[in-house]
Amino acid sequence: MLSDYLKTYLEQDDIVIIGTSRKMLESIAGYPGWACITNIMRPDGVHRRITAFEEGKYKGLAISYQYASCGIKLERPKTLLFLDRHPDENFNLQAIRCVGDDSKIEYM
């Protein structure tokens, strides 16, 4: 179950949420206008979802650290929300780089 605090973010547009829990990311993707990208997805599915998000077809993306820290670059997000911190600080730093310089960074 998602907290009321998190649900306020799901109403926003142009947001990326990053976390370690695949179950949580998949539950976020159940909300209208949202999709998720996790480490069990095929690369072609990942590419389609990123492209659709950048074209404005999704309000937001919920992304696992495995993808957020692998060098993808998203220009559209206004906000990057971390659900949790990865134990390896390098993953956290690389995940921040997946969004544009003007994106607001927030933590739960």
Image (cartoon, grey):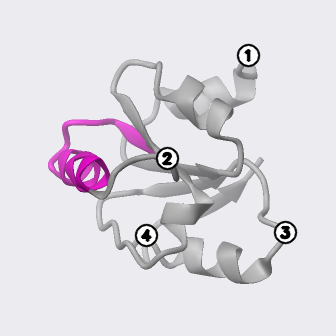
Residue 99 bears which disc, if any?
4
Instruction: Give the Cα distance between marks 2 and 1.
Output: 22 Å
Q: Nearer the viewer, mark 3 or mark 4?
A: 3
Residue 62 point in image, percent of width and height: 50, 43
Residue identifier under label 3: 87
Residue 49 point in image, percent of width and height: 27, 46
| Residue 108 or residue 51, whichever sits in front | 51
Q: Is residue 18 above or below residue 99?
A: above
Residue 40 bears which disc, if any?
2
Residue 93 point in image, percent of width and height: 65, 80
Amino acid marked by disc 1: Met
Residue identifier under label 1: 1
Instruction: Report the residue at 50% width, 79% height from top.
Output: 97
Amino acid marked by disc 2: Ile
Instruction: Report the residue at 34% width, 51% height from top.
Output: 42
Instruction: Give the Cα distance between marks 4 and 2.
Output: 22 Å
SS class of the residue under badge 1? Answer: loop
SS class of the residue under badge 2? Answer: loop
Amino acid marked by disc 4: Val
Instruction: Report the residue at 79% width, 61% height from top.
Output: 85
The magenta region covers: 44-61
Q: Nearer the viewer, mark 4 or mark 2?
A: 2
